[in-house]
Image (tube, rainbow, N blue to C red):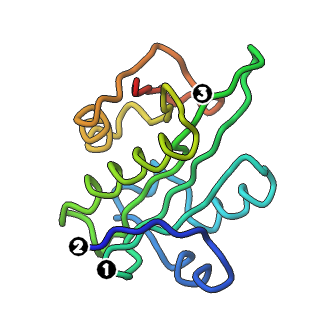
Amino acid sequence: MGITIHDVTQDNEEEILRLSVAESQTNFIETTEQCLEEAKECAYYKPVGLYVDNKLVGFAMYGRFPDEQEQSRVWLDRFLIDANYQGMGFGKMMLQALIDKLVEKYSCPKIYLSIYEDNHSAIYLYQKFGFQFNGEFDVNNEKVMVKNI
């Protein structure tokens, strides 16, 4: 199975915009349209399409963001698998591929993400990959999780 991660470009933007999560997940993550708008406003964001055998199955947005201590943090800021492809193991495959990509791209010692505390399925997935709550909250009052590399 070929897993690839591609930048969002004019060639795939329309397809990216058609991605959506299951109805029960819509309160947990922004739409891809909202994500792409944020990426236009903030140069730190890197939006990407997630592909299995050249078929778009998901979306992610990540980046290296400066923090108050003049250092930076690598964030996996958005991650979703389209509702049509959920429950097929793509979430696990893509999360591992994203972790590998972030470590390779940024040589980072840690990866951060934030999550609503009632998003139990996602928390379970992230914990299986070594993410743990660090006691922080982000600007949207989501709990911050971190994975030590």
Density class for disc 3 (Cα within 10 Å; few <14, some 14-19, many ≥20) is few
| Residue position for label 2 | 1
* Residue type, label 1: Asp
> What is the total number of numbered labels drawn onto the structure image?
3
* Residue type, label 3: Asp
Nearer-the-camera pick, 137 or 13: 13
Mark toward the start of the polypeptide (2 vs 3): 2
* Residue 94 picture quarter: bottom left
Q: Given this view, does label 1 or label 3 mark the residue nearer the observer?
A: 1
Determine contact: label 2, label 1, CB under 8 Å: yes
Residue 88 rendering spot, x and y as whole percentages = 18, 66
**Residue found at x 26% / y 41%:** 125
Mark toward the start of the polypeptide (1 vs 3): 1
* Residue type, label 2: Met
Q: Secondary structure at mark 3?
A: loop
Q: Which quadrant: the N terminus? A: bottom left
Q: Given this view, does label 2 or label 3 mark the residue nearer the observer?
A: 2
C-alpha distance separating marks 1 and 3: 35 Å
**Residue found at x 19% / y 60%:** 89
**Residue found at x 62% / y 86%:** 11
| Residue position for label 3 | 138
Density class for disc 1 (Cα within 10 Å; few <14, some 14-19, many ≥20) is few
Tell me: 27 left or right of 23. Answer: right
| Residue position for label 1 | 53
C-alpha distance separating marks 2 and 1: 6 Å
Mark toward the start of the polypeptide (2 vs 1): 2
| Depicted 147 relative to depicted 103: above or below | above
Nearer-the-camera pick, 48 or 26: 48
| Depicted 13 relative to depicted 39: above or below | below
User: Farthest left residue?
Assistant: 88
* Residue 71 picture quarter: top right
Residue 55 rendering spot, x and y as whole percentages = 37, 81
